[in-house]
Amino acid sequence: MARAASTKGQTRIQREKTEAILEAALEVFATYGFRGATIDQIAAQSGLSKPNILYYFDGKEAIHAELLNRLLTTWLEPLKHLGDSDAPVDEICAYVARKLAMSRDYPRESRLFANEIIQGAPRILIELEGQLKTLTDDKAALIQSWSDTGKINPIDPYHLIFSIWATTQHYADFDVQVRAVLSDKADSRFDQAAAFLDTMYRATLTP
Amino acid sequence: MARAASTKGQTRIQREKTEAILEAALEVFATYGFRGATIDQIAAQSGLSKPNILYYFDGKEAIHAELLNRLLTTWLEPLKHLGDSDAPVDEICAYVARKLAMSRDYPRESRLFANEIIQGAPRILIELEGQLKTLTDDKAALIQSWSDTGKINPIDPYHLIFSIWATTQHYADFDVQVRAVLSDKADSRFDQAAAFLDTMYRATLTP
DNA sequence: TAATTTTCTGACCATATGGTCAAAACTATG
DNA sequence: CATAGTTTTGACCATATGGTCAGAAAATTA
């Protein structure tokens, strides 16, 4: 029997099929949210049969859980890299750039996350109150120390972080809207965004 | 027979029940998205029976369509009020404040909209490419003119608008996350946000 | 108050959906 | 290649869901 959630002791087929399912599920869950997605859609998307999918995962919930599980780590990665620096403004702008790049390169992951949060985070709230809060508190303290020592303008570190999340993820989550508004200028939206955000955060933070 | 989408020539009962249904539907659609929401949930929420709901609306799609229809106008209202001014920075900051107030006062509307956009805006894309784009082009031109005449710092007006949408709507759409991170400081989140955003946009825009 | 119209409901239907299972097909290995 | 183990599937089930309809209940009008 299969159904291994861990990556240990898996056969080639197990690894391949599990990945194929998660890849397809990411697409489907990101587009329709948990309740709106169906196993049949994931089956169609992955080219596997429904029973075959349920051979590898214990159900719809389990697939979704595994996706969220893998996602959170990746998602917090850019923020983890925010470290102390002699040039805090550059450090924060670099974080903004990394985060924007993630919206460009992993839009589905961003939407999966967004769907979950908007709908009240029923299956990830614990992680938010744990991992996410801890990490954010940590980095907010760092930013606060820069603020206190006059290395950056005095601002609320938490809301600075929120604004960075909001502005960068916007380009993944609201991509259709961004494209609709920019229409012919939409192709270079990520480069434009990078330039704008860099300008904005430099202006905001530079003492 | 009922099923009037217009507000004309309605009886008292028609008006009341239609509103009750839309109110309940807003709650449900905002929380679960279109595909995730069920008529039974709307029935339970509104205290009406399912057939009774379908007596007033031609189906799930029709309820959702009516909600989106009413929403778009309200939603674009704050941006419409952005007019020419001798103090463009104040004008834009006032817009930010209005938009943030909408997130505070109408979080469900914000989430309804967010759900729709994230999921690819299948039933509102036309409006985005029409009304929304037209209005945004209009206001972007205004901001550009301020930029050109040196009344505000030179910035990309479209991405400025995107950033305002992103940062303000974030407090409605990602409310659970904001609360989880701020925990005990969460109660005053809208006041904190107002102060932070005002600081950020003043720094960004003031020449 | 009787007739007429509007509103509401229980019972029902067709389809969609999450999930199961026995057996078939396939793979790896002694 | 035979056997043991793994993977896959068609057929199936129970429940959920969008929606219908004939008639009952309530409201309105004559």
Image: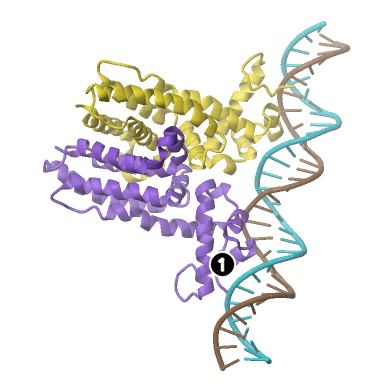
Chain colours: A purple, B yellow, C brown, D cyan
Residue C19 position, x and y percent, is 63, 61
- B106 to A165, vertically: above or below: above
For disc 1, the chain is A
The quadrant of the image that shows the C terminus of chain B is top left
- A14 to B205, vertically: above or below: below
Left or right of residue A184, residue B116 in this image: right
Return the residue found at the far front.
Answer: A184
Left or right of residue A58, residue D14 in this image: right
Give A144 or A199, whichever is nearer the viewer: A199
- A95 to B121, vertically: above or below: below
Residue at the image point whose x is 47% and y is 76% from the top: A9
| Image quadrant in which you'd find residue B65 | top right
Residue B45 position, x and y percent, is 59, 35
Residue at the image point whose x is 13% and y is 42% from the top: A148
Query: In this rendering, does residue A162 appear at all?
Result: no
The quadrant of the image that shows the N terminus of chain B is top right
Residue B115 position, x and y percent, is 50, 39
Query: In this rendering, does residue A163 appear at all?
Result: yes
- B33 to B201, vertically: above or below: below
Amino acid type of the residue tagged 1 in the rendering: Tyr
Q: Secondary structure at mark 1?
A: helix
Residue A30 position, x and y percent, is 50, 49
- Location of mark 1 (residue): A56
Residue at the image point whose x is 61% and y is 63% from the top: A48
Q: Is disc 1 surrounded by few (<14), some (14 to 19) or many (20+) residues within 10 Å?
A: many
Left or right of residue A22, residue A152 in this image: left
Residue at the image point whose x is 30% and y is 42% from the top: A194
Q: How many marks?
A: 1
Give B172 or A202, whichever is nearer the viewer: A202
